[in-house]
Amino acid sequence: MKIRASLHFRVTLAFALLGVTVSTLLGGTLYLAMKDLEQRLIDQALAAEMEDYISRRERNPHSPPPATALVRGYVEPSERFATDVPPDLRTRPPGQYALELEERPYRAAVAEQGGRRFYLLYDISQTVERDRAVLALIISGVLFATLASVGAGYLLARQVIRPVSLLAGRVSGAGADSPATDLASQFPPDEVGQLAQALDHYRARILGFVERERAFTADLSHELRTPLTVIRGATDLLLSDKQLSEPMHSRVERIRRAAEEMSEVTPALLALARETPGTGGATDAVPEVRRLLESHAYLLNGKPVDLSVQLPERFMVDADTALVRVVLGNLIRNAYSYTDEGHIGISLEGADFIISDTGRGIDQELFRNLFEPHMPGASGSGIGLSLVKRICLRYRWQLAVESTGGSGTLIRLRFAASPVLHQSFTSS
């Protein structure tokens, strides 16, 4: 499972985001409130100091303005104090301001009374340094809260997700042939227990479906093989009758071929109906190809077609024989059926079965839906190429088709699993 898709990761991430959001909002709010409170207190102190100096000045015109480590005052007109008023401060109207003089931050107050202007400067350098220290402390608190949230989220997620992971392990470890187990009794009666109970009901239904499928395929296999054997035996007897007319001989031959094709398709369909691929071992494809070439040779009767076959001594395919036969038979039958003249090449090379022809090709409209069931041009009942696709998907074989209308077709079937399986099964 990818880390980002893990429920454990998402719960931990949610806790981390919650922690950083709450701590950031709380720390930011406290910092802004502290800054606002500091400014209000400084402004109130400046206003009180300004009022006190103005009252002292009224009582004693020669009273000097405040001059401490934090507060400096000026008054004009005045022979002693007016010349020291900072130019930036002299142009300000009455009120309170924030300004910087000589690279130091100040809060300033300006007032007018009795034809005089009064100025006060409050050095807030220490306040600014304190604000920076508080901000660093808040950032450290946010980081600590985030780490604490991650740790708490990780531990809590581990505790909460554990029953779900346990349930997933029990379910994934149970196959179709495994005996039914009571999952609900292994978990507390909470949401996970309810999920386990629902899975118990679902598994019981699945097991019922599997049993019915096995019984159906077993019965169907027996019930179909018996009449097919009878039909093939009867057609063989009719074909051995020398008094049979040529038209009747042709009709009986068609019946025999249809019975043989049905005998081939039936086990393939039954094998596909099983939940897992058969375990019949490997299949030598060479004798199967030779038998199919012979059984479909009637399709080339009377056609000026040159057949080229290149087969090795052995070509082992790890698949059910019936399914290999159906795939090869469909591809060979189509090449024989839709090639009226020219050349057909069939070969087994490396891991590939290659068949090329100079037949009619496949027009673009049909090519887009080539492997859909019941398409015009599909062999037999119209499920031939659709069945080929299903078998290839089952064994993860690769199948590529190259064709354009009127210029023939090239098919490459690779009997090997591949991490990149053709999604459309076609490439023009």
Image (cartoon, grey):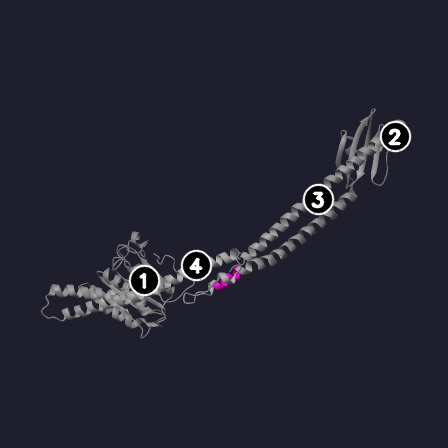
Q: Which of 169/392 is in front?
A: 169
Answer with the quarter of the image where residue 226 lies: bottom left
Q: Spatial distance from mark 3 to mark 2, Cα to Cα?
A: 37 Å
Residue on which disc 1 sits: 411
Element type where label 2 sits in the image: helix
Answer with the quarter of the image where residue 310 lies: bottom left
Residue occupying the point 69% across, 51% down: 141
* Mark closer to the chain start, 4 or 1: 4
Residue type for callout 1: Ile
Residue type for callout 2: Arg
1 and 3 marks in contact (CB < 8 Å): no
Specify the label residue 31 is tagged with.
Answer: 3
Q: Spatial distance from mark 1 to mark 3, Cα to Cα?
A: 73 Å
* Mark closer to the chain start, 2 or 1: 2
| The magenta stretch spans residue 169 | yes
Q: Which residues are magenta?
A: 164-170
Residue 149 appearing in the image: yes
3 and 2 marks in contact (CB < 8 Å): no
Specify the label residue 56 is tagged with.
Answer: 2
Q: Residues within 10 Å of mark 4 (few under 14, many from 20)?
A: few
Element type where label 4 sits in the image: helix
Mark in front: 1 vs 3? 3
Element type where label 3 sits in the image: helix
Q: Which of 363/299 is in front?
A: 299
In the visual, does 170 lie left or right of 127?
Answer: left
Residue 85 appearing in the image: no
2 and 1 marks in contact (CB < 8 Å): no
Q: Quadrant of the C terminus?
A: bottom left
* Mark closer to the chain start, 1 or 3: 3
Specify the label residue 201 is tagged with.
Answer: 4
| The magenta stretch spans residue 168 | yes
